[in-house]
Image: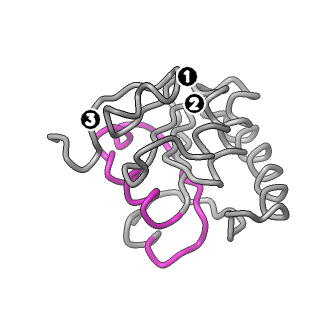
Amino acid sequence: MTLLLVADPGGHLFELAGLRAVWSRFSRAWVTVRASDVETLLPDERVIFAHGHTRRSLTNLVRNSLLAVRIVRRLRPAVVMTTGAALSVPFAWAGRLFGARVVYIECSGRVGISMSCRLIAPVADRLYVQWPEVVSQAPKARYAGTIFLSRR
């Protein structure tokens, strides 16, 4: 199985990297925006750089949507897994378009449902939240603990 792991740099990338026990046994590629934490968090990983700044940039949304279609069509991942934020939306939709399962994990820094979550929920096969009180805010949401406070 091939995973495509997508996350904006910073906390989103940090959380997805924290799930190493989940993704490390699979063939994988990462998509993120070039930032100082990428080399530290993803040494020796295959990383594809997207166009940043992703928040509230219509230009980069279009550019990343085209990139998502190209990458997903080329790699044909079985699963697109993401913790957000804006970069995740086009990759989740492209993943669904090309038959991948989509797993979205709401960031632990969000006690509620983000805009990214709302936009990805229609195509998500699994939608995880990291706060039990958030389960009722999204019909597909599941609570399975938090990334940083769970046992490994």
Residue type for callout 3: Gly
- Give the crowd class for mark 1: few <14, some 14-19, many >=20 residues within 10 Å: some
Magenta highlight on residue 35: yes
Q: Earlier in the sequence, mark 1 or mark 3?
A: 1
Q: Residue at x 42, y 32 (%)?
A: 128
Q: Which residue is mark 3?
A: 145
Q: Residue at x 85, y 64 (%)?
A: 59
Nearest the camera: 95 or 109? 109
| Label 3 crowd (10 A; few <14 / some 14-19 / many >=20) | some
Mark 2 Cα-neighbour bin, 10 Å: few <14, some 14–19, many ≥20: many
Q: Is residue 52 left or right of residue 108?
A: right
The foreground one among 122 and 2 is 122
Instruction: Identify the residue position indicated by label 1 in the image.
Output: 125
Kindly identify which numbered label has been placed on residue 102: 2
Residue range corresponding to the magenta coloring: 9-37
In the picture, measured across the screen, residue 145 lies left or right of residue 74, that is left
Cβ atoms at labels 1 and 3 below 8 Å apart:
no
Give the residue at x 57% y 36%: 80
Looking at the picture, how far across and down is residue 7, in whole percent?
A: 53, 54
Number of numbered discs present?
A: 3
Pick out the residue farthest to the left.
151
- Which is in the foreground here, disc 1 or disc 3? 3
The percent position of residue 116, horizontal first and vertical second, equals 61, 45
Q: Are marks 1 and 2 in contact (CB under 8 Å)?
A: yes
Residue in the foreground of this view, choosing between 35 and 72: 35
